[in-house]
Amino acid sequence: MQFGLSKPLQKFLKIKQLLPADMSCPFYCWSLHRTKYHGRSTLIAMNISNRYALLFTGLQSADWEDIDGLVLDGIKQAFLREGYSNEQTGQYLKAAGAVEFSKLHGDKALAGLKSIISMLKWLDVALVDGQFFQPLLSRELNSESCYSFDYDDYGYPSEFLAKDMQRVLQTDSS
């Protein structure tokens, strides 16, 4: 699994060298960016294939040190909330492999992140105190029509995710 870091996030994390982005399987690639939401330090994680987004707020300095664990836990929580079983979520994570930090996955990934940042400016969703992953805000972002990397038409990130998961689960059961 590749986590493509935005340049501001790479600088903030003080990571000097990143792997080149590998676009061979975008469903296992996520773009990560640091921003502010309601004055809180916020991490956006966006899937490259389907533009499915996760938001994490209220991160302190020490929390950024385990960014890969934070995002993996968020993926698990989000997939379970979408109705996937622990087994199906585990299949996805196993197929994705170990986390590697890379450069962003091209202009479309950057455009997707910019679109999410714009949406955050007008969204006013109550934050869940005491936890980083924000399921209500993430669900709101995933219910907005968008254009994604792997699909030729507009649609909803949650629907694109369902198509990707169906494809992966069928491949694993064959």
Image: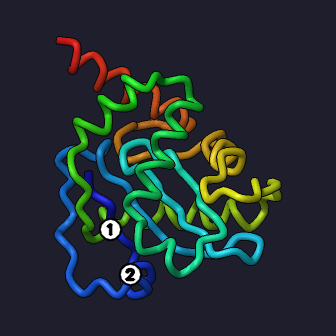
Residue 44: image location, x then y, percent: 53, 62
What is the count of numbered marks? 2
The residue shown at (39%, 31%) is: 89
Q: Is residue 55 above or below residue 9?
A: above
Instruction: Say which amino acid is labelled 1.
Output: Leu
Residue identified by numbered label 2: 7
The residue shown at (47%, 74%) is: 64
Q: Is residue 137 left or right of residue 28?
A: right
Residue 154: image location, x then y, percent: 52, 39
> Which badge, 1 or 2, comes first in the chain's sequence?
2
Residue farthest to the top?
A: 174
Q: Nearer the viewer, residue 32 or 90?
A: 90
Q: Assign a secondary structure to mark 2.
A: helix
Q: Assign a secondary structure to mark 1.
A: loop
Residue 95: image location, x then y, percent: 22, 36
Quadrant showing the C terminus: top left
Residue 25: image location, x then y, percent: 22, 44
Q: Is residue 85 left or right of residue 114?
A: left
Q: Is residue 114 above or below residue 49?
A: below
Label 1 and label 2: CA atoms lie apart by 8 Å
Quadrant of residue 119 within the rendered picture: bottom right
Residue 41 — which label? none
Q: Is residue 18 above or below residue 174?
A: below
The residue shown at (39%, 82%) is: 13
Instruction: Say which amino acid is labelled 2.
Output: Lys
Residue identified by numbered label 1: 104
